[in-house]
Image (cartoon, grey):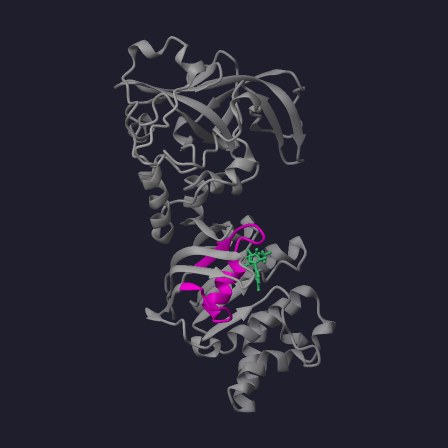
Amino acid sequence: MATVALRDVSKVFGDGTLAVDNVSLDVQDGEFMVLLGPSGCGKSTVLRIVAGLEDPTSGAVLLDGDVANDLAPRERKVAMVFQDFGLYPHMSVRDNIGFPLRIAGIEPESRSERVADIASALGIGDVLARKPGQLSGGQRQRVAMGRAIVRRPSLFLMDEPLSNLDSGLRAELRAEISALVRELGVTTIYVTHDQAEALTMADRVAIMRKGVLQDVGTPTQVYSRPGTLYVAAFLGSPRMNLLEASVYVHLDRYIALHLGDQALYLPWHDMRARQVAHFHGERIVVGVRAEALTPVVPDTPGDVLHGRVRYLEHHGHESLAFLDIGAFAVPVDDIAGAAPVPTNGTGSRLSKVAAMFRGRNNSHRDEEFDGNGHHGSSAQFGGGGTGARNQPVSVLEQSGRHHRARAEVAVRLAPYPSLRVGDPMSVAIRIDQLHFFDARGQRIDVGWR
Ligand SMILES: Nc1ncnc2c1ncn2[C@@H]1O[C@H](COP(=O)(O)OP(=O)(O)OP(=O)(O)O)[C@@H](O)[C@H]1O
């Protein structure tokens, strides 16, 4: 049994690469934590720091509450499984699995008993006499798992253990691995760039980008209430629809979210309305997943957007229609520059940046919007807000006002619908499933999840 805590951990390699940037993370006893992110985001480096294979440049690693920075890897009671399996090719499966026990001086008899038990639990009891070269990829990975758990580690570290396998086997093994580690109750940190693996296996997911921790939560939390625009765009397929919206507050009644010529209305009694109201007269990002959109007939009352089909994609089990509703897209490249969610260690850095810009009056009223005649009945919130949005990295400003691309809103449909490109289409929107992000990519309704 073990807990792991990272406190403000950074790693700068000799060539100046900042691989891990001020990461703080707690892994509970028996928890299955998945580190998720694109290639090069620093997740393997975090794992190697926990294992003791790399020293952090700054910050502390705590194992069971004690600072472990100076402990050698073998003193940390961790077992590590890598994507390349790392088996000894000249040894049999039996000897590969039993190797850590031999090193630990366990008697041959009890050694072979433990090896047989583990091999049968992993479904490789019948290949004990073979060499790794005579096994399938899935069997090799099971042997690697067996060798890692045979010593009953208190902490399991797995670095993309399934990435060399084909997709059918990956799905099979991911179910097996999560069942096995849960049965053993071993605290596990599992690194992957595959969101399906993360969302299906994890108790909690920690999402990294460029060395920075972006969000931590249960799969449901990070998917349903992503903490940053980056996480919103990273998780889910099709990608979440991200639209530029101008906010206009009609005090005590509703908040109008103008998307080009159309608008959505957030009722005042909605718990998120007060937070969104701080952005009166400004542009924010409204996110909506395809599953929150339902095709309807054009005169359907309620929260409905109208558009035209720009293109269709057929995926066999479903089709996707991409609608032009006259709204502007939030450019994905700029999302990549969005700031991390201010939790634990990342918060201090962000608040410093925010403090630098606090007080600088860069609130921008939307000229196009101001002319639409709605503002007469509205309250002014112009100077309000927390200062956190007065931040240099803006996903809305970077794209430049004259080169903004029209959004293509993804809508899920039954397979092969009788629709054609150019057809009009109306969709009802679940207002309760809208996501709101400020111009630097932070979730606006932070207390919501
Ligand atoms: N020994 C090293 N010296 C210099 N830079 C390194 C070293 N090891 C890793 N890096 C760099 O640090 C960054 C993070 O690497 P890391 O392997 O942790 O990423 P990752 O998210 O695990 O990527 P992948 O999924 O591709 O394995 C990358 O830019 C990588 O090139």
Residue 239 can be seen, yes or no: no
Identify which residue is drawn at 58% across, 22% down.
323
| Horizontal side of residue 205 vs 249, given as left or right | right
Looking at the picture, tell me which residue is in the foreground, 372 or 101.
372
Identify which residue is drawn at 27% across, 17% down.
379
The picture quadrant where one finds residue 408 is: top right
Can you tell me which quadrant of the image ligand 1 is in?
bottom right
Task: Examine the rendered structure and indicate whether residue 351 appears above or below residue 277.
Answer: below
Q: Which residues are magenta?
A: 32-58
Looking at the picture, tell me which residue is in the foreground, 427 or 68.
68
| Horizontal side of residue 98 vs 434, given as left or right | right
| Tally of numbered discs | 0
Q: Is residue 53 magenta?
A: yes
Q: Position of residue 427 (x, y in %)?
A: 51, 21
Q: Position of residue 406 (x, y in %)?
A: 57, 23
Looking at the picture, tell me which residue is in the foreground, 400 or 134.
400
Task: Examine the rendered structure and indicate whether residue 324 appears above or below residue 318.
Answer: above
Q: Residue furthest right?
A: 134
Q: Is residue 221 magenta?
A: no
Looking at the picture, tell me which residue is in the foreground, 319 or 91.
91
Q: Position of residue 213 (x, y in %)?
A: 44, 51
Identify which residue is drawn at 44% across, 76% down.
77
Q: Position of residue 241 (x, y in %)?
A: 52, 31
